[in-house]
Amino acid sequence: MRRLDDSLLIATHNAGKFEELTALLEPLGIRTVFARDLGLAEPDETGTTFIENARIKAHAAATATGLPALADDSGIEIDALGGAPGVYTADWAETPAGRDFVLAMHKAHKLLVESGASAPWTARFCCTLVLAWPDEEDAAFEGKVEGQVVWPMRGTQGHGYDPIFVPDGHDQTFAEMDRWEKNRMSHRAVALDKLVKALGA
C-alpha cells in the first residue's frame, strides 16, 4: 500500500472519534486534520454496510480537500436484536436537537427487555476504516471487539454506547475505563493496527 505524507484528514465531525484516532496515530508522527475544523459538509450515509458508509465519507473528504482522508464507520451489534442497531447505530440516537446516545441506549435496553432474551446479552463493537486518496484509490480495514451489553449504564468516559458495553475478559464498561486503556483495545485500535501494518510502519 502507498505511504502517507505527514498529514491525514480525519473525515468525521465526531470529536470523540477524532480524539481517539488522533491518539492512536500519534506514535506514527502523522499530523491529523479535523474535518469539522475545515467546515466540510457531512455526506449522506446511504450505504447498508459499515464499509460502504466509510467509503462514502473517506472519498468525499479526499475529493473536497485533496488530502488523503481516513473515515470510520462503526457501531454495535447486539445478538438478541438480530445484530441491530449495526450500521444504524448512530441513527438510533438522532433527535431534532441532535444525537442523544442516552436515548439510544435506553431504546436498546427497552428492545432487549421486550425481546425476552436473558442476560448475558452478547454483542460486539465493529469498526471499518477506509483510507482514501484524492485519485480514488482506497484501502479498508476492519476491527471487532466482542463483549456484552449491560444495564444500567456505567461510566462517564468514552462516547456513543460505551456506557453499556463490557468487553470480554473485563468487568468495566468502555465508559468506566481510562481512555488510554480503552484505546489500546477498541474496535478502532484493532482496525487501525491493521492499517499501520499495511503502511509498513
Image (tube, rainbow, N blue to C red):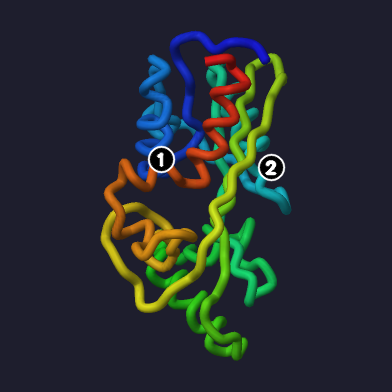
Disc number for residue 184: 1
Disc number for residue 51: 2
Residue at horizontal 56%, vertical 28%?
A: 61
Decide if residue 196 is in sight here: yes
Disc number for residue 132: none
Give yes or no for contact between labels 1 and 2 (Cβ–Cβ under 8 Å): no
Q: Secondary structure at mark 1?
A: helix
Q: Which comes sooner in the sequence, label 1 or label 2?
A: 2
Q: Position of residue 23 (x, y in %)?
A: 35, 31
Q: Secondary structure at mark 2?
A: helix
User: Is residue 48 left or right of 160 when viewed as pictured?
Assistant: right
Label 2 Cα crowd, 10 Å radius (few <14 / some 14-19 / many 20+): many
Decide if residue 97 is in sight here: no
Depth check, mark 1 against mark 2: the one in front is: 1
Location of residue 185 with respect to 11 vertically, above or below: below
195 and 66: which is toward the camera: 195
96 and 32: which is toward the camera: 32
Estimate the spatial distance between the alpha carbons at disc 1 and disc 2, rounded to whole Å: 22 Å
Q: Position of residue 163 (x, y in %)?
A: 37, 64
Q: Position of residue 72 (x, y in %)?
A: 55, 40
Q: Quadrant of the N terminus?
A: top right
Q: Amino acid at mark 2?
A: Ile
User: Is residue 14 left or right of 113 when viewed as pictured?
Assistant: left
12 and 170: which is toward the camera: 170
Residue at horizontal 57%, vertical 59%?
A: 124
Q: Amino acid at mark 1?
A: Arg
